[in-house]
Amino acid sequence: VSDSLQPLCRPRAAAFRLDARAPLKMTDGFNVNSCVDKEFHTKSFHDIADASVSALEGIGPVATGIFEDGLCVKNTVKTVRDLGTWRYYRLARALRDLKDTEVKGKREEHCEASLRAGLNKAWASKSLEEICAAPLSAFYGLSIEADRRFAKAPLHITSIEKLGECKYCRWASAIVTLADLAEEDAKVVKANKALEVAEAAKKAALEAQANAEEVAAAAKAALAEALKRAEGAESARAKSAQELKEEHQKEEAAVKAEKEAEDKAKAAQQALAEAMEKLNKMEAEKDLAEKKRKEEEQKRRVAERQAALEAQERKGKELEARFRKIFKEIDYNCDGFLSHTELKKYVASKDAAARLKLGIGRWQDFLAEADTDGDGKVNEEEFVSHFTRTNLDPVKCYGALFDAIDCYGNGFITVGEFNEYQWYKNPNLFRLLGVSNWTQFVGTVDVDGDGTISRDEFIAHYTSMANSGKILAFSDEATGEPAAKRARM
């Protein structure tokens, strides 16, 4: 396959420009011969994506009619691209990928995450595991006849999960993805080629201008010679009328040649101006395309960083809900506090493995650690905050925070990026991390002299500070140690 995707693998800081004059090397193409017929071994991903489904190795022309859209009762899958984006394959793939995330017996009564429009009514209330094991007729729009067609060779698809794992569909989806990426790469190559043509036109125009100037100089020399001869004829007067006529003709020819040379020079100047205008237009289009690509890349990075932060916030909320439930189990008298007696009674009712999973060893040590205000009791917020922070992965949390602050995505951040970050947009995550004062949090950064800090340095720095208790908690004052630790000190 001749599509080159090398620019997608270059470092971010490298200039994104292809040299259109460099010939395409044979090693630039990929080898996907095992999934396409022989006639497509040297084709591009774009050509394969637009080819018939029978281009896939092993599917054959007989099987191309199997992929029928039940909603319109006709075969809508004609090309490899149609198969890679086929509605029923995408549904099956999504259900299969989410199957392992389902907690058995925990289906929420009012959960809005459903697929009523994609499944028959009898299957809409089933679990993901049951739906994945169901026949294809469980999809809305596919009948029992579809079960019979897909079960035959070469597909042998008997369930929704097997449709999601179908190698032909997976091949088609991968080819479509690479074809779309390669098409973007081809646009850059085309732009560079057009730029090369414009530069060649500019060179030709300059050469034409030089030739025109030489012709004009020769014409001027001829005119000077003609004038000299005319002066000689006038002084001699002995020349015949025929000779005078010939001299006059030569003079006219010289004037005509000079005019033609001037016209050629003007044409060369016009061609040069047009070439320069075309070149400037191509440069502007190329700069606009590069600017658009960078803007889209920046939007994608911002969305990914925000999704990572939101994932950590969601996990924190789940942990808070879990430990609030445990708190209410321990709080026998429902006064909103855990006393020595209640905690001791609860710990005694659990075996060693359960206490280890919860994070409680000796209840006296736990009480001293969780009691941040030093009143000898643990309230609900102290309990939930302690165990939520204990169960959060600091590497993932601080990694997501670093990626959000690193607005340029270069793996390094400056103190300026720290100060400009709008931390108040994710208050729950910072509360779970125990951060209440952003200015003091930023003030703990110790850059190593170059004015920047790397991702590994950032995670190691704040993880060690969190483990040593140096990051402020919301229940503490703006300065100083937590109350329980101050009491023990």
Image: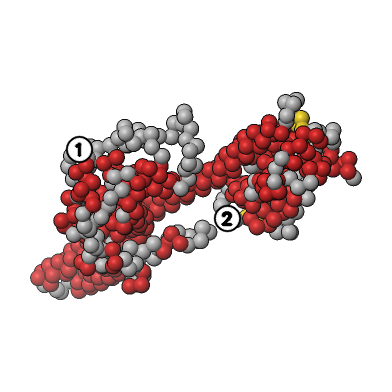
Residue 72 disc label: 1
Q: Looking at the picture, which amino acid does disc 2 mark?
A: Asn
- Estimate the x, y position of residue 201 in percent, counting from the top left: 30, 62
Q: Nearer the viewer, residue 228 or 324?
A: 324
Position of the N terminus, as image quadrant, is: bottom left
Looking at the image, which residue sits at the far left? 242
Can residue 26 be seen at all in this image of the molecule?
Answer: yes
Could you say which disc has been placed on residue 410 in the image?
A: 2
Mark 1 is on which residue type? Cys
Answer left or right for 155 relative to 24. Answer: left
Proximity of marks 2 and 1: CB atoms separated by less than 8 Å: no
Query: On the rendered image, what quadrant is the C terminus found in?
Result: top right
- Residue drawn at 46 percent across, 28 percent down: 110
Badge 1: residue crowd in 10 Å (few <14, some 14–19, many ≥20): few
In the rendered image, residue 171, in percent from the top left (x then y), is placed at 31, 57
Check the image and tell me how it is coloured: secondary structure
